[in-house]
């Protein structure tokens, strides 16, 4: 039974590692569909992409999709704030660890020129190794890759 559990854990870890690697490789190619904010190799990554949408109520918007992806023994967290004229109009917190993913979306106005701010942390649970960044200054949504 222990041998079967070990094999299952190794298979799961390998599968998650391959999926994170594929996302990271996609994000690093020219004209990629994802922007990579940060990563620890293929073990933990924070990704984002945007797509235009039209709302009959709010006008032209960007739908921003955010992903924190991890493999076993790694964790990640990110904050994404949509800012308009210095005021936060949307805030998202993502968190994942030990092979899980967190995927969320938010919206930003194309008409009002919304910007974003981020903060994040990634790390290895068993060793305590990690990296991170405090809240960044406002940045243009156009910096995020198109989905």
Image (tube, grey):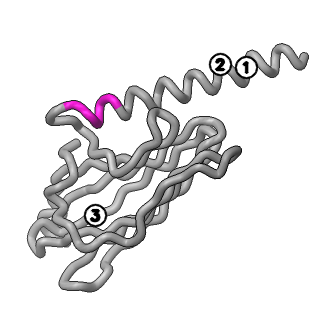
For marks 2 and 3, the one nearer the N-term is 2
Classify residue 22 as left or right of residue 9: left
Along the horizontal axis of the image, is 90 left or right of 127?
left
Please tell me which residue is depicted at 26% across the width and 68% down the height of the picture: 116
- Image position, residue 119 (x, y; %): 41, 65
Q: Any mark on residue 107, and which?
A: 3
Q: Which residues are magenta?
A: 25-29
Q: Position of residue 126 (x, y in %)?
A: 70, 44
Residue position marked by numbered label 2 in the rendering: 11
Q: In terms of image quadrants, where is residue 58?
A: bottom left
The residue positioned farthest toward the right in the image shown: 1
Of 124 and 46, the residue lying toward us:
124
Badge 1 element: helix
* Numbered label attached to residue 61: none
Say which quarter of the image contains residue 10.
top right
At a point 47% along the width and 28% down the height, the residue shown is 19
The disc placed on residue 8 is 1
> Which of 109/115 is in front?
115
């Amino acid at each position: 039974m222990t041998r079967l559990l070990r094999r299952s854990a190794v298979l799961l870890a390998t599968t998650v590692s391959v999926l994170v690697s594929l996302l990271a490789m996609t994000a690093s190619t020219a004209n990629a569909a994802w922007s990579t904010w940060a990563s620890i190799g293929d073990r933990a990554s924070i990704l984002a992409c945007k797509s235009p949408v039209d709302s009959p109520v709010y006008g032209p918007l960007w739908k921003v999709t955010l992903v924190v992806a991890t493999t076993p023994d790694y964790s990640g967290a990110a904050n994404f704030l949509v800012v308009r004229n210095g005021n936060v109009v949307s805030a998202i917190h993502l968190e994942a660890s030990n092979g899980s993913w967190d995927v969320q979306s938010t919206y930003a106005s194309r008409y009002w020129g919304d910007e974003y701010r981020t903060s994040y942390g990634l790390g290895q649970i068993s060793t305590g190794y990690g990296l991170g960044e405090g809240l960044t200054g406002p940045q243009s949504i156009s910096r995020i890759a198109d989905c």
